[in-house]
Image: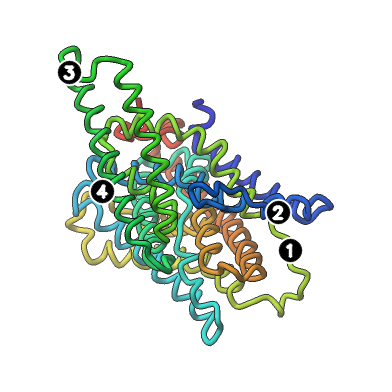
Amino acid sequence: MSFLRSERNAAAILLVAAALGLILANTGAGAELLSINAAHIGFPAINLDLSVEHWTSDGLLAVFFFIVAVELKHELVAGSLNSPAKALLPAIAALGGVIVPAGVYLLFNLGSPYGDGWPIPTATDIAFALGVLAIFGRALPGKVRVFLLALAVLDDLVAILIIAVFFTTSLNLPALAGAVACVAVFAGLSWMLARGGREGASGALTNRGLRVAIGVLMVLIALLTWDLVYQSGIHATIAGVALGLVMAAKPAARTAHTLQPWSNAIVLPLFAFSAALVMIPSVGITELSPAFWGILVALPVGKLLGITVAGWLGNRLVGRNAPRSSVLTLPDLVMIGGLGGIGFTVSLLMNELAFKGVDLVIDEGTLAVLLGSAVSIVAASLLVAARSRAYQRTAVGVDDEALDSAPADSPFVE
């Protein structure tokens, strides 16, 4: 399983899955694959009827968001964001990395009907960004990874809020109330597991059978929570976020650690394959929509400018009072900005949500996300490699394995 937990390998698998989806969609097998992706699988008894594509994006992706939420909570409580001083500079850089790409996108779409796509280039794919850093940045100091992780986690938090607020069209209040109640029950059961583990031999939950029964019950409640969130009108992946945030720390860390290889090997690749399964539009460059150009430019350019400028201003304004671990040089900020332009997973999800029902624009948006992320991957790889060589020359390095494994205080370390 260590192979699938590696940030390098996870990024490589994700890239291969997306490339395979795009290539196959434009071969003789494309029509059949698109038909399978659009086929519906329903459960009338519980009012569920989703296409294969949406079972992937609404269902399986909730597992990924659960893991993101567990890491977000850990960073806020005990990690690189556990104090305002630590969080301030990454937060300023992350804010610039949201506002500027959104502004660049809107500049390309002034007067067009595609303004709702502004959230698409605001996302950073944490798995891909850390993977590129691990591959090309072996000599970088640990504070670079900590800063990138903090920025990407805050970026994910913004993405979660955007999905919850801007892509909720109507609310089913009884279903939402039921979901809230399920989340509360789930939190209570996880607390019981954590309390039993602390009490050891004298604890109330030393009976293995009882602990297994509670675990099974939590899985069933998690599934019910997902269904109720879906029925409520809020995007179903928010169920994974809610469960990850309320689950007691130790059971959450164990669960996320167990799920992470499956997320890297199955959930994210399947989503990337499904989302990238689009036929390249047979139109001239001048006929592509403003949404395509907005995303294509905003991801690599908007992200780099936003993160770099905001990070530099943050250093100038509050850097003297910030911990040294959160202060980066301008070249390092440029490198982080390049990595931030790798939108990929969350950008693909937002593309589907923003242009729901407009298939041609979804396809163009998907291509723009893939191309924009590819440009960012190449640029970031060059920037990371250059900074790594610079640190090597000045003998400010870290152990080769430091950037390929979770930090010591990570919630996924056993």
Q: Identify the residue at horizontal 23%, vertical 66% (top origin).
A: 317
Q: Position of residue 228 (x, y in %)?
A: 39, 51
Q: In the figure, 311 relative to 61: above or below?
A: below
Mark 2 neighbour class, 10 Å CA radius: few under 14, some 14 to 19, many 20 or more: many
Of mark 4 and mark 2, the one earlier in the sequence is: 2
Location of mark 3 (residue): 203
Spot occupied by residue 118 in the image (x, y as percentages of width and height) = 47, 72
User: On the picture, is 324 further left or further right than 307?
Assistant: left
**Residue farthest to the right?**
28
Residues 173 and 303: in front is: 173
**Residue linked to disc 2:** 22
Spatial CA distance of label 4 from label 2 is 37 Å
Q: Earlier in the sequence, mark 2 or mark 3?
A: 2
Q: Earlier in the sequence, mark 1 or mark 3?
A: 3
The mark closer to the camera, 4 or 1, is 1
Instruction: Name the quadrant of the C terminus.
Output: top left
Tag 4 residue? 81
**In the rendered structure, which disc, 2 or 1, sits on the residue that comes first in sequence?**
2
